[in-house]
Image (tube, rainbow, N blue to C red):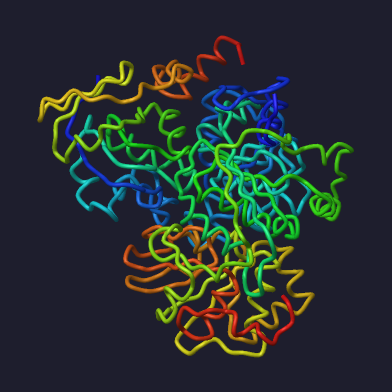
Amino acid sequence: MKMTLVQKIIARAAGKPSVAPGEIVTCKVDLAMIHDSGGPRRVGPRLKELGVKVWDKDRVVVVSDHYVPAVDTESAAILKLTRDWVKEQGITRFYDMKGICHVILPEHGHLAPGLFIAGGDSHSTMGGAYGCYMAGFGATEMTGVLATGETWTVVPETILVRIHGRLARGLSAKDIMLMLCKRIGMENSFKAVEYAGSAVAAMSMQERMVLSNMAAELGCETGLVAPDETTLAAMRAAGRAPDADALSWRGDDGAAYAAIHDVDAADFAPQVAGPHSPDNTLPVDGYAGRRIDQAYIGACVGAKLEDLQMAASVLRGRKVADGVRLLIAPASAKTTAAASADGTLAALTAAGAILLPSGCGACAGLGAGLLAEGEVCISTTNRNFKGRMGANSAEVYLGSPFTVAASALEGRIADPRPYLATAGAP
Amino acid sequence: MIAGRVWRFGDGIDTDVLAPGIYMKKPVEELARHCLEAVDPNFAKNVKPGDVVVAGKNFGLGSSREQAAQALVILGVGAVIAESFARIFYRNALNLGLPALFSDDVAKIKAGDQLSVDPTAGVMRNQTTGAVLACRPIPPHLMDMVSAGGLMPFLKRKFAQGAA
């Protein structure tokens, strides 16, 4: 049987020579990731109820990123519980305030092509950028995964998105994903998406991670990119030697897809999603001129080193508009270190940006940077549902780091391309 | 058999309105009092045990936060009937023993109707209009778990039998 990449990974994890879409299979989990919000405080008591410990402490990664750093006694208690639980379980792969889980996993060499990974967070799809199956699960289901090392899935059909050509200056993977949320919609549940084509081949891993991250917004179970030399180089840089057969993880020629979408990377403008949904997308002109109170550069999807570099390419030598606050929460400690070393942070702060701790923060309505009633924010995050970043009447627009930076300069939603016309490529 | 009054919602009810982030660190019972308040401030106050949530497409899209389904369980919701569900919410609901049922007949159900639901047979009766409506039964591979009351009781049984 000709199989897509996701079928091949699921077949391997299910111990079968092949699987077909629609088949219900039980898979062995190669790695399980949980965080402080859905993790120990919710799975801990349940494992106790079952009278078991985690099935394999070396296959569990725990990340404290949602309530970091503690802002009150409630968040402090959650973080303490997380530390205590990790110790009790003997788990050594614990990242306490080192960054956001989906960025931590590849930074520390936990991802590899062909792995089957269960993550206790919806944006776990981001791991698919490394050619693995990674999907999100809730806390009770993660309890089952941690207790048994297994989970079930209905083998998904794959939507193939081929992105051709080259992204123009001022465009990024984020613009592609906002456009796709509108074009193919957010209701692709129980399907996988795979990204391919010359624009994807030319993308860095951090940009591919944006495609995979926002597979969650498409409603997809996971979002994969077949591994290539770029993938292997990123693994080596993170201290993980790829398996000899790593590049064999790819779909068969002639495999059947649920749908194939072709995207011309050269043929679109920066995209902005208006309140209150990522599919409420228009080319930036459609929202340009809307006044903003806050610009936020944060989250797994939108505050990696390259995101900060994109913002800096717009902000360097310029100043954030009066009356606007530009808040930046780098995605991880390593991101901060690298952005500090290469001058990116200095360019951002010189423009007037305020640095916040690394973590999920305002994106998930948890940390610093929440919005008051009626306030307007443009954000590099991935969701803008009602009330997500604070008050129910706050309006959140989503855009790329380029667009968010340009909007911070003007105090209004703005096209970033004029600011990049003379600058060097980011 | 589940029977109760219908609370009607539209398409794209997301996990941020089901379980608002700003209450996520509170005990889940407290969070449940804010369930869906951004779209219907009366829901959490007035919903009665056994009532049924009926909605449009892609119910529960967004986060993996299980509290989105758990809040409905705490409020006593008997079942969620929707044209379609987001994957993680769907799994979370069934894992917590909350029947989540796909139906193409939601347009024939209005807010305040009395609805009875048989999740095993996939039959609903709108007692207000008299219409007999269809929903997709819970898939057979999950029926054991849902009838056990969810994944935890199911796992307990499995571990007690030493089968895990």
What is the x, y in percent for residue A311? 63, 76
Write the residue at 24% across / 23% down. B117
Locate residue A123, reporting x and y percent.
Answer: 57, 49
Q: Toward which corner of the image does residue A244 lie, by quadrant?
A: top right
Q: Is residue A40 visible?
A: no
Residue situated in front as seen by the camera: A328 or A250: A250
Q: Quadrant of the N terminus of chain B?
A: top left
Q: Is residue A277 visible?
A: yes
Relative to B159, residue B62 above or below: below
Is A176 left or right of B1, judged from the image as shown? Answer: right
- Residue A246 as seen in the image, left or right of residue A13: right
Residue located 52% across and 71% down the image: A296
Q: Looking at this view, name the residue that lies furthest to the top.
A: B161
Q: Nearer the viewer, residue A30 or A336?
A: A30
Above or below B85: residue A285: below
Residue in the foreground of this view, choosing between B67 and A26: A26
In percent of the image, x 56 and y 28: which residue is there? Answer: A153
Query: As rendered, which of B27 and A411 lies closer to the eye?
Result: A411
* Quadrant of the image occupied by residue A372: bottom left
Image quadrant containing the C terminus of chain B:
top right
Figure disc tally? 0
In percent of width and height, residue A198 lies at: 73, 56
Position of residue A228 measured from the top left corner of the image (x, y, whole percent): 80, 49
Residue at 75% of width from left, 75% of height from top?
Answer: A340
- The quarter holding residue B118 reads top left
